[in-house]
């Protein structure tokens, strides 16, 4: 990859590798950008902007007749075959060059090693550096290539190290759009933009705020789950007020603390066993202050987010049992041989379950006060929220249906029932895929797309899931274990 970019620029601008690299570093390895500047402003201007000085090769050509020349650094007479000349025309003995390169590489200056001549700012030819250093220090030549490769990653916003822990050693490159989710060959999936777990349809900022919130609120939420019970009508957590087992929610619903069931306001006096206070206070109804409301709102979204994350984890275990079921079906004497619907259905379930769980923190921020308070009126917000929740609920119910079908012991079913299950799974998979598309469409166009003051990018929805990213390879001919791509590039290079 790095090599491809270099070769393209070398070819286009007719420059050597080190100049191509300097240009590319300046344009953060964005070849398209570089070409655009080249077309618009011309070569000279572009080179000047990038700080590339094509020092006019003063003709210091060595007279052919001489068998030895004097090196200006070590003042030794050395055979012509043992000296190297850079673009700038400066010529020194290989021994002095090598020492110079080794010092620079060890100083971490591989990216731009300059000529040894006094006041010369020319950058040394990478091929010469590689050739001379590898003769004496093959390991250092590797280090040189690694440095160049690392700078390629550090300077390039389209290439990043895989964030897996322990680190798998891979760097990944994406095309076109940095707002995407990628999968490394090590199996880890992540958001390319912020390097945390894949979190679409949350934007990176939403996800960052959400994870922080979950950490900050976890104690409070635990306390509430222990000390409150959900109201049977509106599902808000209600705190028990004293020893009385008849509690009342702010929505007006009274219920029994012991069984959680809704009750009438007066009938329960004598019915609640071990009732000790004998008093029921009607006040406290308006005590739902802002902070509490805010927390309950968070809990609503968090509960659903957590429920789907938990389901996802449980369904992950289905992978094994499903293999068994398919195996059982395959050994049966049936006219069906194709069971791809099982694995496809399972895949659709995993994929959509994740999206559904991340759609809750998305909704928390989209329709809350934290991020977009000034973006819409309360009425607009309500309309948008209804629109979104309709789609979210449709998606949710279809995912639950699919989950039930996939968990069924269909390998023990009759032929007729297997056909039925197959049809259901295939249909639901298509419906879910379409609902996901629709929900993303709503998010990208009606919700995030209509924002005036803020920009939130999300990784787009892909039916086939998160894509495997390309791994750029370490360039340079000295690198052992070079893969085919790189080999090809080297061949071209030599041709
Ligand atoms: Zn010398
Ligand atoms: Zn020079
Ligand atoms: Zn990895
Ligand atoms: Zn992100
Ligand atoms: Zn209630
Ligand atoms: Zn009581
Ligand atoms: Zn009860």
Image (cartoon, rainbow, N blue to C red):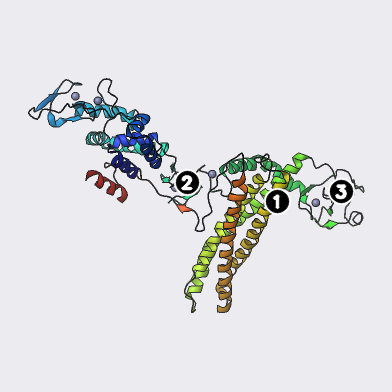
Res. 147 in view = no
Task: Looking at the picture, tell me which residue is in the foreground, 272 or 57.
Answer: 57
| Res 485 visible | yes
Compared to residue 210, the image places residue 334 above or below, namely below
Q: Is residue 487 left or right of residue 391?
A: left
| Sequence-first disc among 2 and 3 | 2
Whole-Å distance between the Cαs marked 2 and 1?
Answer: 31 Å
Q: Nearer the viewer, mark 1 or mark 3?
A: 1
Q: Does the residue labelled 3 lie within 8 Å of ligand 6?
A: yes
Q: In which quarter of the image is residue 46?
A: top left
Q: Local crowd at mark 1 within 10 Å, few (<14), some, or many (≥20)? A: few
Which quadrant is home to the N terminus? top left
Nearest to viewer (mark 2 / mark 3): 2
Which residue occupies 49% across, 58% down? 464
Query: Spatial distance from mark 1 to mark 3, Cα to Cα?
Result: 40 Å
Locate ligand 4 by image quadrant.
Answer: top right
- Badge 1 vs badge 3, beta-carbon distance below 8 Å: no
Residue 326 x %, y %: 50, 69
Q: Which corner quadrant of the image does residue 425 belong to?
A: bottom right
Residue at image mark 3: 244
Q: Residue 333: x percent and y percent?
A: 48, 79
For the residue pair 395 and 277, the one nearer the viewer reads as 395
SS at badge 2? loop
Q: Disc 1 or 3, which lies upstream in sequence?
A: 3
Q: Is residue 3 left or right of residue 468?
A: left
* Residue that carries the numbered disc 1 in the rendered image: 383
Cβ atoms at labels 2 and 3 below 8 Å apart:
no
Q: Residues within 10 Å of mark 2 (few under 14, many from 20)?
A: few
Residue 223 image offset from top left, x and y in percent: 72, 44
> For the point 61% across and 61% down, which residue is it?
399
Disc sitting over residue 177 in the figure:
2
């Amino acid at each position: 990859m790095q090599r491809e970019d270099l070769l393209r620029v070398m070819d286009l601008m007719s420059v050597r590798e080190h100049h191509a690299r300097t240009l590319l570093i300046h344009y953060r390895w964005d070849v398209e950008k570089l070409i655009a500047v080249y077309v618009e402003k011309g070569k000279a201007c572009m080179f000047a902007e990038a700080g590339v000085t094509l020092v006019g090769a003063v003709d210091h050509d060595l007279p052919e007749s001489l068998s030895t020349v004097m090196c200006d650094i070590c003042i030794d007479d050395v055979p012509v075959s043992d000296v190297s000349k850079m673009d700038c025309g400066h010529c020194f003995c290989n021994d002095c060059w090598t020492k110079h390169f080794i010092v620079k590489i060890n100083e971490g200056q591989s990216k731009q090693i300059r000529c040894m001549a006094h006041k010369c700012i020319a950058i040394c030819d990478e091929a010469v550096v590689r050739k001379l250093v590898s003769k004496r220090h093959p390991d250092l030549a590797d280090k040189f290539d690694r440095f160049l490769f690392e700078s390629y990653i550090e300077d390039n916003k389209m290439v990043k190290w895989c964030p897996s822990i322990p680190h798998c050693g891979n760097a990944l490159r994406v095309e076109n759009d940095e707002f995407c989710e990628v999968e490394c060959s090590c199996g880890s999936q992540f958001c390319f933009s912020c390097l945390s777990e894949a979190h679409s349809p949350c934007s990176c900022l939403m996800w960052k705020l959400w994870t922080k919130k979950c950490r900050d609120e976890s104690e409070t939420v635990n306390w509430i789950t222990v000390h409150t019970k959900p109201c049977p009508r509106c599902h808000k957590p209600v705190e028990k007020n004293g020893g009385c087992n008849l509690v009342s929610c702010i929505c007006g619903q009274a219920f029994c603390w012991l069984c959680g069931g809704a009750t009438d306001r007066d009938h329960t006096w004598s019915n609640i066993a071990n009732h000790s206070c004998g008093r029921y206070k009607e006040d406290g109804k308006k005590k739902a202050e802002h902070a509490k409301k805010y927390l309950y709102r968070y809990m609503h979204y968090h509960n659903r987010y957590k429920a789907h994350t938990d389901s996802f984890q449980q369904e992950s275990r289905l992978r094994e049992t499903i293999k068994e079921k398919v195996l059982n079906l395959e050994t049966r004497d049936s006219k069906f041989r194709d069971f791809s619907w099982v694995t496809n259905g399972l895949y659709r379930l995993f994929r959509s379950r994740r999206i559904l769980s991340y759609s809750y923190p998305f909704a928390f921020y989209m329709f809350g006060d934290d991020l977009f308070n000034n973006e819409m009126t309360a009425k607009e917000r309500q309309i948008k929220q209804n629109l979104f929740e309709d789609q979210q609920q449709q998606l949710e119910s279809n995912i639950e249906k699919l989950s039930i079908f996939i968990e069924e012991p269909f390998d023990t079913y009759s032929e007729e029932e297997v056909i039925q299950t197959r049809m259901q799974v295939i249909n639901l998979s298509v419906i879910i895929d379409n609902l996901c598309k629709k929900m993303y469409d709503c998010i990208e166009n009606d919700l995030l797309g209509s924002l005036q003051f803020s920009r939130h990018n999300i990784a787009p929805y892909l039916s086939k899931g998160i894509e495997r990213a390309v791994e750029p390879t370490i360039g340079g001919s000295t690198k052992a274990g070079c893969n085919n791509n790189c080999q090809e590039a080297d061949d071209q290079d030599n041709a």
